[in-house]
Image: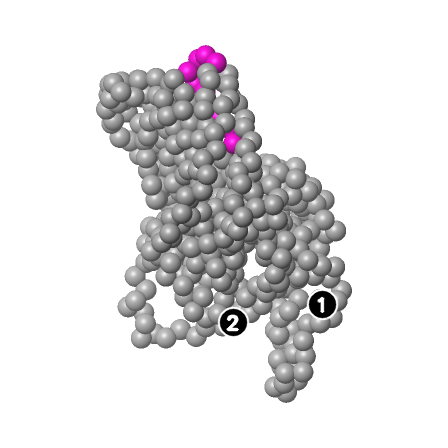
Amino acid sequence: MCQIPGAGNVKVSFWLSPEKVYYGPAWYQKKVSIPESWKKQHINLYLERAHWETTVWIDEQKVGVQNSLGTPHDYNLSDYLTPGEHTITIRVDNRVKDIDPGVDAHSISDNTQTNWNGIVGDIKLTASSPIIFQNIKLYPNVTDKMVTVKGQVSNSSGSSQKCKILLQVREVGHTKKELQKVIKEIEIDAEGQFEIEYAMGDSPLLWDEFNPNLYNMQLRLESEQGIDQKEVTFGMRDFEVDGKHFAINGRPVFLRGTLECSIFPLTGYPPTNVEEWKRILKTIQNYGLNHMRFHSYCPPEAAFQVADELGVYIQVEASAWANIGDGKPIDQWIYKEAEAIINSYGNHPSFVMMAYGNEPSGENHEKYLEKFVDYFKKLDNRRLYTSGAGWPLLDNLDYYNHKGPRIQGWAQELNSIINAEPPQTEFDYDKLIQETPMPYVSHEMGQWCAYPNFKEMSKYTGS
């Protein structure tokens, strides 16, 4: 249902219709007491999932603005929070302003998620050493039995510092077997980068849908300023293209997938807890599926965590279903959103595929997406990339995501295979496969009418 503004209480059976609809700024404020032990520490404000644009003030000082839809909003408050009492003010604004992901993008639309306002998931204020890890990326190499660890170190101490980085990998599961310790010493000014090769032993456990073996990488950063620690879960896997097929760790894989459009009508937003994502992903596995596409949005961390544990291959999209390539603010925002998604979730072995978003439009969308795919293939090769879910077919894609394999296409009416022919099993989609020079992933194969059961009306208690 959607409520028509200015037309009274008239509802149209199309979108969700929350009891209350609000587009605009919402203000949240909290007084905090900063302990003396946090002096000269790196202080971070973490907002797991905000919708949409956040602006943060400490007392009367404006800190900054962030507007990612698919990733946490992180604010460095080190220069603002001294020991003593302070007031943190957060303004959340869900209006679509200069950046327009598209009226039907499931990241913001009342079609499914609703354009809610607020913050869900973890809201944390943390303090750590002034020298910290940032943007840690793990690149598994199954062939060489290695992991390349790339990362950044931020130093806000005000002087050059000598640091020691310690790495150690542990198996996840019953054995918790520990691998070797690796130590590297570096010296950094305000910012530094490092790259370390970590050997995984003679026979590392591989990750796939049948054996979703996981490892934890423990990272420790020691300096005279203190200690910073990070733990990253990863899997040893290569998800690649082999001709017109996908292969994981050199073995053919066939995707049996479904669509997740952020359909959570009781709340109007996706859950951030592990338990709910286990219910969802175990349900699709019980139906024999191994793959989930997130339509024009990116799920929270918990979804990736569960997909890792259960062995589900997922396709993520950079929060858009839009007109692109015309030089409007959305063009640069999609790059920023996609990069933030990769930085936040790119170490998860389940994150094997990525698109800009759904069904692109705009006169220049093909040129835009060709550059988009090139850019991200060079930036991070740990997954495969396509243009948009639905189209277009471009030479530089890793795979093609298209709507061809449908037994009932839009406006086909009595001319579709299912209606023009008697019931049969003699047709297939071989022609589509032969014409396509890369793996072909079907796009929204079935869209069906659902007839309402009015006896169930009492169960519809949310949006």
Left or right of 158, for residue 141: right
In the displayed orientation, state which residue is furthest to the bottom.
Answer: 422
Q: In the image as oriented, which residue stretches furthest toward the front?
A: 202
Q: Is residue 48 above or below residue 5?
A: above
Q: Is residue 283 above or below residue 45?
A: below
| Residue on which the image places disc 2 | 448
Colouring method of the image: one colour
Labels 1 & 2 near each other (Cβ < 8 A): no
Q: Which comes sooner in the sequence, label 1 or label 2?
A: 1
Q: Quadrant of residue 158?
A: top left
Q: Where are the magenta residues, as a range?
A: 151-160
Q: List the residue tagged with mark 1.
A: 432
| SS at mark 1 in the image | helix
Q: What amino acid is labelled 1 in the image?
A: Leu
Task: Please name the amino acid that badge 2 sits on.
Answer: Trp
Farthest residue in the top direction?
159
Name which residue lies at 64% across and 69% down.
405
* Circle nearer the viewer, 1 or 2: 1
Q: Residues within 10 Å of mark 2 (few under 14, many from 20)?
A: few
Q: Is the residue marked by circle 1 packed among few (<14), some (14-19), or many (20+) residues within 10 Å?
A: few
Q: Residue at x 53, y 51 (%)?
A: 203
- Residue 93: x, y in percent? 41, 37
| Residue 1, placed above or below residue 45 | below
Q: Residue at x 25, y 18 (%)?
A: 36
Q: Secondary structure at mark 2?
A: loop
Q: CA separation, marks 1 and 2?
A: 23 Å
